[in-house]
Amino acid sequence: WSNRNFPWAKKLEDNNKKVFGNHSFRPNQREIINATMSGYDVFVLMPTGGGKSLTYQLPALICPGVTLVISPLVSLIQDQIMHLLQANIPATYLSAAKEWSEQQEIFRELNSDYCKFKLLYVTPEKVAKSDVLLRHLERLHARELLARIVIDEAHCVSQWGHDFRPDYQGLGILKQKFPTTPVLALTATATASVKEDVVRALGLSNCIVFRQSFNRPNLSYFIVPKTKKCLEDIDKFIKENHFDECGIIYCLSRMDCEKVAEKLQEYGHKAAFYHGSMDAGQRAFIQKQWSKDEINIICATVAFGMGINKPDVRFVIHHSLPKSIEGYHQECGRAGRDGQRSSCVLYYSYADYIRIKHMISAGVMEQTPFTSGYNRNSVASSGRVLETNTDNLLRMVSYCENDVDCRRLLQLVHFGEKFDSTNCKKTCDNCIRITEFIEKDVTEIAKQLVELVKSMGQQFSSAHILEVFRGSLSQYVKKQRHETLRLHGAGKNLSKSEASRVLHHLVTEDMLVEEVKKSDFYGSVSSVLKVNEPRVSDLFSGIRTVTLRFPSSS
Ligand code: ADP
Ligand code: ZN
């Protein structure tokens, strides 16, 4: 797709320079544009800051007709439109909050023979709830003026992901109504299972996938035990490493945000808080102060994030445990967008895990802000979704408790990427601390785990398999009668982290596969571990051994 002989090649070059002011294309941008302009459905995984917007704004500019962009947040949309208008690209948006007369005006323009708009942004609830919008899209389509459909933050389609939004699920209707219009789905965060889920829900066919490495070489990762002195530790960390620089501190609750901000102010930092109970005006005020550097530390819930474009964020601190590795990666990703060295520090305590687990089951987690009457409680508590959320959280816990493996490697494995940890170059706490390793042969343990998965009928989650392997007698284990299995407790001499490292290794080596299971009426998903027979046969015939590195002292 990198070919420069497409008929539109020169137009791309010229407009990229003249209109967008870029000297060249970033990795994958040209390829994505060529694929979508060739009429294919395209799925893009690109980390935050990679330059996703250009991949649809540039085609929108040079193709006839209107490009429909579905984006979850009005603030994000407004920001995009401001930039487009500055570049003289006619763009507008529809949201439930817009005056009806204003919406009428936009519809009239869409109907006109010479519709001036190149881009029409809408929030997903508009697609779900507005028949008027669909009718106008049909008319555009009939006149061959619906150029392309762009789904931004496409991971929101998947309940399997970390940021599910119900209104996104209805977007499959677009492909049904407009099967020949190319769809471009964009996200900065998706594991293989989320990607599959999104592609299926949107009804994409023969979709071309572009994925870019999620490694962010300029970020350093640290997990620090969280103690009562956490706020003093944070103060010290900032003063020693990032004095007077910009940073975000992610907190669990609104009250935490306020408490942390207040304490940091006492310590002499220019800090403020930001969360979902503030009204739009207050939030806009803080964002403005932050972009003008009048405030340099924001203590926020995850409500602060999407669409935050500050390039010089030098640190992201997690005052408590994030809900998922995807969320963590994305939140950390707001640091160092200018490519300069930046730090990501997470203060971890098991007590936070318990607290979050309770919040998830009670349905009181703060989500990223939403534009319609999205009821966050309704999502959190139903069976499978609850299980997915708990599973995501457990993976985050095991990431934090892993005190051996390269953090970068652990994150990238989660996104289905291979990574050689020598390339970390001592930019994570584990790589810095552990200088000498020994390789241990864990083939026997690996075989036992595979057998256990089989004896349980290949229909349980990794968390449950580990429980049984280490001899748990929990209610659920007994309910399934798994305490009667021969290998129940076979791994009782291993620590939880040792056992889970071996199990995860089997997954990354493709001997066990995580299978997404669609399992209830609502189409929610969870994952179970299955055995990949061709890959494990070498293990049992002795051709293949499994070794893991351990710190040489252990
Ligand atoms: P994403 O949506 O992937 O997070 P954006 O589209 O917001 O990223 O782009 C991030 C920044 O990179 C923006 O400031 C944008 O102007 C800039 N950018 C995008 N493409 C290029 C390019 N080819 N050359 C230079 N800057 C670019
Ligand atoms: Zn490392």
Image: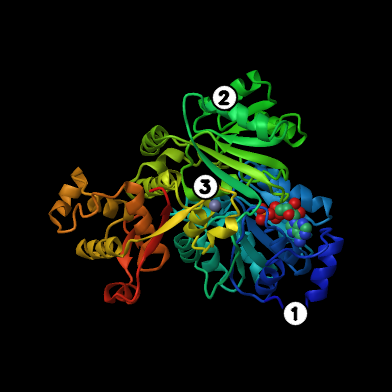
The location of residue 79, given as percent across then percent down, is 72, 46
User: What is the residue that sits farthest to the top in this orientation?
Assistant: 266
Q: Amino acid at mark 3?
A: Gly
Residue nearest the viewer, comparing 517 with 236: 236
- Crowding near pointer 2: few (<14 within 10 Å), some, many (20+)? some
The location of residue 331, given as percent across then percent down, is 58, 44
Tell me what residue is drawn at x 77 percent, y 64 percent. 61
Q: State the separation of the CA atoms marked 1 and 2.
A: 58 Å
Q: Which residue is mark 3?
A: 327
- Crowding near pointer 1: few (<14 within 10 Å), some, many (20+)? few
| Residue 6: mark | 1
- Position of 2 compared to 153: left or right? right
- Position of 82 compared to 367: left or right? right
Q: State the separation of the CA atoms marked 3 and 1.
A: 37 Å
- Does the image show residue 335? no
The location of residue 36, given as percent across then percent down, is 66, 71
- Position of 462 compared to 307: left or right? left
Across the whole image, how many numbered discs are drawn on residues?
A: 3
Q: State the separation of the CA atoms marked 2 and 3.
A: 26 Å
The location of residue 402, given as percent across then percent down, is 43, 47
- Crowding near pointer 3: few (<14 within 10 Å), some, many (20+)? some
- N-terminal-most mark, 3 or 1: 1
| Residue 232: mark | 2
Looking at the image, what colour scheme do you see?
Answer: rainbow
Q: For the residues labelled 3 and 1, say whether their Cβ atoms are less than 8 Å apart.
A: no
| Residue 380: mark | none
Q: For the residues labelled 2 and 3, say whether their Cβ atoms are less than 8 Å apart.
A: no
Q: Secondary structure at mark 2?
A: helix
| Front: mark 3 or 1 | 3
